[in-house]
Image (cartoon, rainbow, N blue to C red):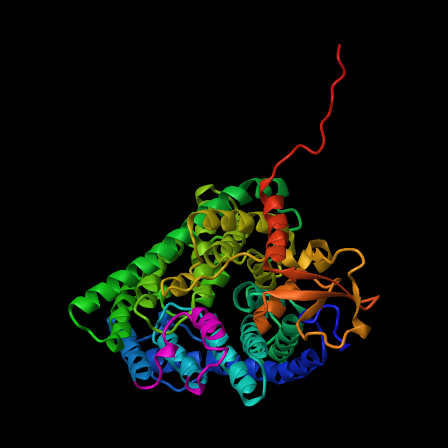
Amino acid sequence: MRSRPSALRDFTVDRRTWFLSAVAIVIGFGGAGLAVLLLRAIALATNIFYYHRVSLELVGPAGSTLPHFAMLIVPVIGGILVGIMARYGTDKIRGHGIPEAIEAILLNGAKVHPKVAVLKPISSAIAIGSGGPFGAEGPIIMTGGAFGSLVAQWLKLSDAERTTLLVAGAAAGMSATFATPIAAILIAVELLLFEWRPRSLVPVAVASVTAGALRIWWLGAGPLFPVYLPGNIHLEQSLLIAIPLGILVGFAAAGLSRLMYGLEDAFEHFCGQVHIHWMWWPAIGGIGIGIGGFLFPRGLGVGYDNIAELLRGNAPVALLIGLIIAKSLMWAFSLSSGTSGGVLAPLLMIGAAIGEGAAHLAGLPGPTQALWALMAMGAMLSGALGVPLTAILFSLELTHALPAVLPLILACIASYLVTSLVMPRSILTEKLGRRGYHLSREYGVDPLELVTVSEVMTELPPGDEVIVGEMHFLPNNYVFSDETCRAVAEEMATTGSLTLLVVDRENNRLVGSVGAAELLAGRRRAVKRELERSIAFQVELPRL
């Protein structure tokens, strides 16, 4: 009898995992290098557009010495350039970055065209450097993922292995950009991997750590936005406010998602009516950026300085109002035009402004305003993206504000609960949902993994068992009685056989058969656990 493992398709750690982990080190180097190049390219583009000089100095558009009316023109020029690159290069550079990475994983076998790896960072640098109110994280996730995909395509790998390396590149880029290696691993799991297994988690973690270490040497250790909270942060008060604040931010996150996609629908309808080619849409989006920048210059660009000021507490009221209203409108309108940019930094900024604005209205001091800004920042990320664990750790890694961990958790979970109830999909997966693709936002163990073949198989009558060694022929399509029903389902999917023989591993006996009906019995057990309610314990009070 041929030798088979007890769970033939239980993909765990094997020599392929070691190989992918070794490749992930190379991808970690590449992802970190691309992150540094993108940040430098954004700085270069900002200096060229707003300061008319060739420099890598980190500056923002708001400090430009150009005439104020230039704020109306520069974003339009950037939009024209992005549209030309998309039209004559590849239209895959349009969009947030993360949805495109998900699409490559689910629909294209984790294969990304080399043009994306080259043009995505360039187009993003132009879009952001010309004033686009976007973050760099989405583009670097797509760029790092493209690099990982290219490496994987050069090797002889399966679809699942290519996916692992694509996600490893994405995690490496995020880890190097934000100095958040743990959050980079988690966002890879919650948004891109669609699984939590050693075969994929280990290489992704290796790439993230490699990129995180290189970031320390190349850009500094972080945190990116240090927050110094006193040891006594009025914990009771913070815990009481965390849930209402999280609920408020959750509704704001849902509103931002609907605003952006509503504008996208209006954009497509209007441009379709007047027959404007999509190549010019980013330029029209640039008009919205220009008007917003003319009225509120600090809404232009990535705006990391805005986030830092919010997390210090006591931000001016004008900044809070400008970020909540002007930044939201600029970001939603311009991104709906199909330009190249990310969503994380704007969401963090708007969420922090809502939290600090609420604390300001309550007349609370600066340290408390900073705490509320931090809680709302994490809650916005949790609700809008549907990634509560990532949001919690991302906020902590960005700030190193460990005293805020308990209220931060409550705020993130409350926001996640709200958006789970009012939004069928997250702001990232909505784009794919509109194209007709379904993405689950839940993770769970396959119920068939919890049921063994021996529990559901149809047994042979007593005395009819056959010693396998005495059989002249045993079909290849058989399973062992100690295997899980998931292994049976995968064997059926692979071979097309709807009924398999069952062999007792210890005694080498043919003991029964298992088919689709038996697998449904395993599924019924999971349904029963979900639906049947009963009282398992009851206290009987003594009679008086």
Residue toward you, 492 or 475: 475
Q: Residue 353: horizontal and vertical position, in percent?
A: 44, 54
Q: Residue 239: name its quadrant.
A: top right
Residue 46 visible, this angle: no
Query: Dividing the image into 4 quarters, which one contains the N terminus?
Result: bottom right
**Which picture quadrant has residue 534?**
top right
Q: Residue furthest top?
A: 544
Q: Is residue 369 above or below residue 161?
A: above
Q: Is residue 393 above or below residue 283?
A: above
Query: Can you say which quadrant of the picture contains the C terminus?
Result: top right
Q: Nearer the viewer, residue 114 or 375?
A: 114
Q: Which is nearer the eye, 70 or 539? A: 539
Residue 22, relative to residue 427: is it above or below? below
Name the residue located 77 percent from the left edge and 74 percent from the top edge: 471
**Left or right relative to 470: residue 35:** left
Query: Is residue 79 something that shows in the picture?
Result: yes
Q: Which residues are magenta?
A: 88-115
> Which residue extends farthest right?
507
Q: Position of residue 431 (x, y in %)?
A: 38, 64
The answer to whether 318 appears left or right of 69 in the picture is: right
Figure label count: 0
Q: Residue farthest to the left?
A: 274
Task: Report the residue at 28% width, 71% height from top.
Answer: 286
